[in-house]
């Protein structure tokens, strides 16, 4: 990869606003995107954060968490009118009078505001997100700020420095057991850009009507499905059925694979019995149980929040404890790594 390439550290930055971009394009309205390119200190949003603004005045996303969004929207209107991108250098609170209280953010920010990508890049992004296929999207950092999309990472920076989104497809979250809790987890997880698969071999369990259309429902034994669809390292599986035949089938198959997060629902006593049954299972030390953070929740929604909270914390290498008790940065600043 070219040494001027700036790689977005989280591929969800672009995809989280893409449904808004695509909907307005299909309605015939122009859209611009604002991307956070750099900053000189910590901030509320990660580098690569994206904000989309449409010609009808609506917008989604954020590049600073609120400190400079008004200025960015003014610049977006200019870009919508002219069709020419702009690189902004902004300091939150720079326009305040001396006696006015400034915002929490004080560092200098660089934000690129440019028309959303035209075809074929737009269609390539839409298709990749719809089918969970890998795609690399490049945005030039010099005028005229050209977009491109390719599956060849080595080719994306041939024309000069670029901001690069490497989109590997969504993480899969496999839920073994078609329960009311699985339905609640699936609804939350869809908003977090997980591709949710719910597995259950039992008759009628998948027919409750409780599951969101975003989840794939599969009737069958988990071990058979997992053998045909191996989990990747960043995928996850949670056993929820309360039926040891189903849960154990799922756990044995998942622990034999690459997924780093494999967990099971149940009380401490239930989990102790589970560990005894699975004692000879390879990879058992990776099993998380009882699954979830200690929130004291009772309702289905609270339990789903507890489970997904632990999943997110685990994926980010965090404990899930209160922020006030921690010393690490609230928002890590990995930077836009030069490759």
Image (spheres, rainbow, N blue to C red):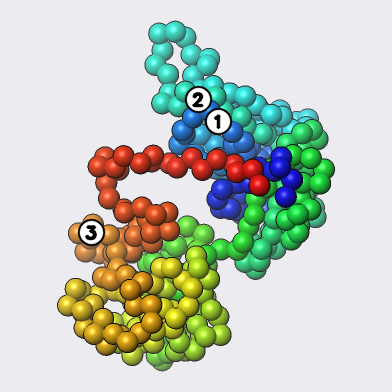
Which label belongs to residue 39? 1
Q: Which mark is residue 294?
A: 3
Q: Are marks 1 and 2 in contact (CB under 8 Å)?
A: yes
Q: How far apart are labels 1 and 2 at the CA level?
A: 7 Å
Query: What x and y, as percent, mark residue 217?
Result: 49, 79
Q: Does residue 301 show up?
A: no
**Earlier along the polypeptide chain: callout 3 or callout 1?**
1
Estimate how packed mark 2 is, as few (under 14), some (14 to 19) or many (20 or more) residues with alpha carbons within 10 Å: some
Left/right placement of residue 310 relative to residue 163 reads left
Mark 3 or 2, nearer chain start: 2
Vertically, is 39 above or below 325? above
Q: Which residue is mark 2?
A: 107
Quarter of the view holding residue 314: bottom left
**Residue 83 rendering spot, x and y as whole percentages:** 78, 34
SS state under label 3: loop
Residue at x 62% of width, y 36% of height: 37
């Amino acid at each position: 990869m070219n040494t001027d390439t700036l790689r977005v550290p989280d591929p969800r930055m672009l995809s989280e606003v893409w449904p808004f971009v695509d909907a307005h394009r299909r309605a015939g309205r122009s859209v611009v995107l604002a991307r956070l390119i750099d900053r000189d200190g910590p901030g509320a949003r990660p580098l690569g954060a994206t904000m989309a603004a449409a010609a009808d005045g609506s917008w989604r996303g954020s590049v600073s968490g609120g400190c400079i969004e008004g200025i960015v929207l003014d610049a977006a209107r200019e870009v919508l009118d002219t069709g020419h991108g702009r690189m902004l250098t902004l300091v939150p609170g720079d326009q305040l009078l001396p006696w006015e209280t400034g915002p929490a953010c004080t560092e200098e920010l660089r934000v690129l505001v440019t028309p959303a990508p035209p075809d074929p890049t737009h269609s390539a992004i839409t298709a990749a997100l719809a089918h969970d296929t890998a795609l690399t999207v490049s945005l030039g950092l010099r005028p005229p700020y050209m977009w491109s999309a390719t599956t060849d990472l080595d080719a994306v920076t041939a024309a000069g420095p670029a901001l690069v989104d490497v989109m590997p497809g969504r993480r899969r979250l496999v839920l073994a057991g078609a329960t009311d809790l699985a339905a609640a987890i699936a609804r939350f997880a869809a908003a977090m850009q997980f591709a949710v698969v719910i597995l259950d071999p039992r008759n009628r369990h998948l027919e409750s009507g409780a599951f969101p259309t975003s989840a794939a429902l599969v009737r069958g034994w988990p071990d058979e499905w997992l053998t045909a669809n191996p989990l990747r390292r960043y995928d996850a599986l949670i056993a929820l059925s309360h039926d040891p035949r189903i849960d154990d089938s799922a756990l044995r198959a998942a622990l034999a694979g690459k997924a780093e997060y494999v967990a099971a629902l149940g009380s401490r006593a239930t989990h102790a019995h589970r560990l005894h049954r699975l004692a000879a299972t390879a990879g058992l030390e990776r099993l998380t149980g009882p699954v979830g953070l200690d929130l004291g929740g009772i309702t289905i929604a609270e339990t789903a929040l507890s489970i997904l909270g632990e999943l997110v914390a685990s994926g980010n290498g965090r404990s899930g404890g209160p922020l006030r008790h921690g010393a690490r940065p609230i928002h890590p600043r990995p930077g836009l790594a030069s490759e």
